[in-house]
Image: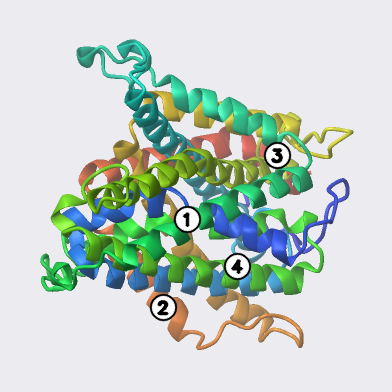
């Protein structure tokens, strides 16, 4: 049994249309990252973990993600293959480690999509409540029979809409996504502009009320805030998963990843700084922190606009991540590690139709049944695990294949940066509870069973 058989993944695959440009990639990356994190998590993290010092947490989280983005950029430049970390590890470490990375990526995007759908539902329910409309209890919350809740209907409905959109050709989806991303930026720009006239510097005086926290095993402080804000940057790797649909992938993927990450980081810092300057951080533990802050300073009209935009534009994150999730499932099926029907392309749109439908169904079930709080940490720990594998892979890539060639992206300061990335990722992982670690272990166990019961025998490399 050869669990580490490698494959030449640096090839494009026929069938997918190569029509995505640099702008499309930047919008895809921003659409995936800017969403739940900036509209909801910033308030919660400031109130309960870091206070105004959350801007330092954001910088630390962005630095961690940025290191991984450099590794993704070099791999995308040297091994332009669909599947992101999965394909890169397939070429470097072999099949079984690659499968684990692919499985963890599926877990990441599935829970991320369902979580964002739940966030969208929370905003929409608030809008309905203002109009005096309330859903029946049985359809108005994740599974909790003691409270009379059995399923949260709205996340399921929004995932039906998102899946229908992603089933169209990629160009149509990303053009629609671009419109919503622009709308999202208009709301955040309005928040910053209005908020600048209502800043109270006294709100920043107790800048770090919870301190720096513990590097390993902390529960509050700047480091705990960074481990939570890491969630807000997830999705940057969705760009590399569409490589077969990108023009000049060696050049455009690294640029798309780096530029979208830089824009998102600056935006997060600006919004958090204004948010904690407008309202005392202790009051920000609410689901709609951005709109709430505007209402607190008497700008209700702006708060209403932000709420409406949030309802519409959180869909962009669902679109971007469903797009990436379906391409991940397609990549695994193309290599024989999942059933072959998942790699079938629609003859008209050239979209992996069944993979997209499966992604939509899985995310709809998760969003309708499981609460966001129970999956956010699980999502993070899955992502951090395969980012550690990526850091190790860049070291092995350099050892086996040397430096990048002219025209290819080069990660600076190797091996220092990969080792630093591993240290930070492990630090973040230790911030999570025992329950999260148990769920992570179960996910790895299920993925391992799937590989040995199906993937190993049906792998294209086995043929």
Closer-to-camera residue (291/10):
291
Q: Secondary structure at mark 2?
A: helix
Residue 84, by quadrant, is bottom right
For mark 2, what is the residue?
419
For mark 1, what is the residue?
234
Q: Which mark is residue 257?
A: 4
CA distance separating discs 4 and 3: 25 Å
Closer-to-camera residue (419/76):
76
For mark 3, what is the residue?
333
Which circle's residue, 2 or 1, is located before the other in the chain? 1
CA distance separating discs 1 and 3: 24 Å
User: Is residue 339 at all visible to an observer of this figure?
Assistant: no
Which circle's residue, 4 or 3, is located before the other in the chain? 4
Closer-to-camera residue (192/422):
192
Q: Secondary structure at mark 3?
A: helix
Depth check, mark 1 against mark 3: the one in front is 1
Residues tagged 4 and 1 counted as in contact (Cβ below 8 A): no
Q: Is residue 122 left or right of residue 65?
A: left
Protein image colouring: rainbow
**Residue at the image point whose x is 37% and y is 33% from the top:** 122
| Residue 293 screen position, x and y as percent | 27, 52
Which circle's residue, 2 or 3, is located before the other in the chain? 3
Depth check, mark 4 against mark 3: the one in front is 4
- Is 388 placed above or below 451 here? below
Closer-to-camera residue (454/290):
290
The local crowd at label 2, few if under 14, some if 14 to 19, many if 20 or more residues have their Cα within 10 Å, is some
Q: How many discs appear?
A: 4
Which circle's residue, 1 or 3, is located before the other in the chain? 1
- Is 149 placed above or below 160 here? above
Residues tagged 4 and 3 counted as in contact (Cβ below 8 A): no
């Amino acid at each position: 049994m050869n669990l580490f058989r490698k494959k030449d993944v640096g090839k494009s695959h026929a069938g997918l249309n190569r029509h995505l440009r640099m702008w499309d990639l930047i919008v895809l990356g921003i659409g995936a990252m800017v969403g739940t994190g900036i509209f909801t998590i910033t308030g919660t993290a400031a109130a309960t973990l870091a206070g105004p010092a959350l801007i330092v947490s954001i910088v630390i989280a962005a630095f961690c993600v940025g290191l991984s983005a450099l590794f993704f950029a070099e791999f995308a430049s040297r091994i332009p293959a669909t599947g992101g970390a999965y394909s890169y590890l397939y070429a470097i470490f072999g099949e079984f480690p690659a499968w684990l990375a692919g499985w963890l990526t599926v877990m990441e995007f599935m829970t991320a999509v369902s979580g964002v759908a739940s966030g969208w539902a929370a905003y929409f329910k608030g809008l309905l409540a203002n109009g005096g409309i309330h859903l029946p209890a049985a359809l108005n919350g994740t599974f909790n029979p003691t409270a009379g809740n059995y399923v949260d209907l709205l996340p399921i409905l929004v995932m039906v809409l998102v899946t229908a959109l992603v089933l169209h050709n990629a160009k149509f989806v990303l053009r629609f996504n671009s419109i919503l991303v622009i709308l999202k930026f208009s709301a955040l720009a309005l928040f910053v502009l209005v908020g600048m006239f209502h800043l109270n510097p006294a709100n920043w005086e107790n800048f770090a009320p919870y301190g720096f926290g513990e590097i390993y095993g902390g529960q509050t402080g700047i480091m705990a805030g960074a481990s939570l804000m890491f969630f807000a940057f997830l999705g940057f790797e969705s760009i590399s998963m569409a490589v077969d649909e990108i023009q000049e992938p060696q050049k455009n993927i690294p640029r798309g990843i780096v530029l979208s990450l830089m824009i998102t980081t600056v935006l997060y810092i600006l919004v958090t700084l204004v948010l904690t300057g407008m309202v005392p951080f202790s009051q920000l533990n609410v689901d709609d922190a951005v709109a709430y802050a505007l209402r607190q300073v008497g700008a209700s009209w702006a708060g209403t606009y932000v709420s409406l935009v949030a309802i519409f534009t959180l869909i962009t994150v669902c679109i971007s991540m469903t797009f990436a999730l379906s391409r991940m499932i397609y990549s695994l099926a193309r290599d024989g590690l999942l059933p072959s029907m998942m790699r079938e392309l629609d003859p008209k749109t050239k979209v992996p139709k069944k993979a997209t439908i499966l992604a939509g169904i899985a995310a709809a079930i998760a969003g309708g049944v499981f609460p966001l709080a129970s999956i956010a940490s699980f999502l993070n720990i899955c992502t951090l695990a395969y980012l550690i594998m990526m850091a190790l892979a860049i070291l092995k890539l350099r050892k086996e294949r040397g430096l990048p060639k002219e025209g290819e992206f080069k990660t600076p300061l190797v091996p220092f940066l990969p080792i630093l990335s591993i240290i930070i990722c492990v630090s973040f992982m230790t911030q999570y509870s025992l329950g999260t670690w148990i769920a992570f272990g179960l996910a790895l166990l299920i993925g391992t069973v799937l590989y040995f019961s199906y993937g190993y025998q049906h792998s294209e490399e086995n043929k």
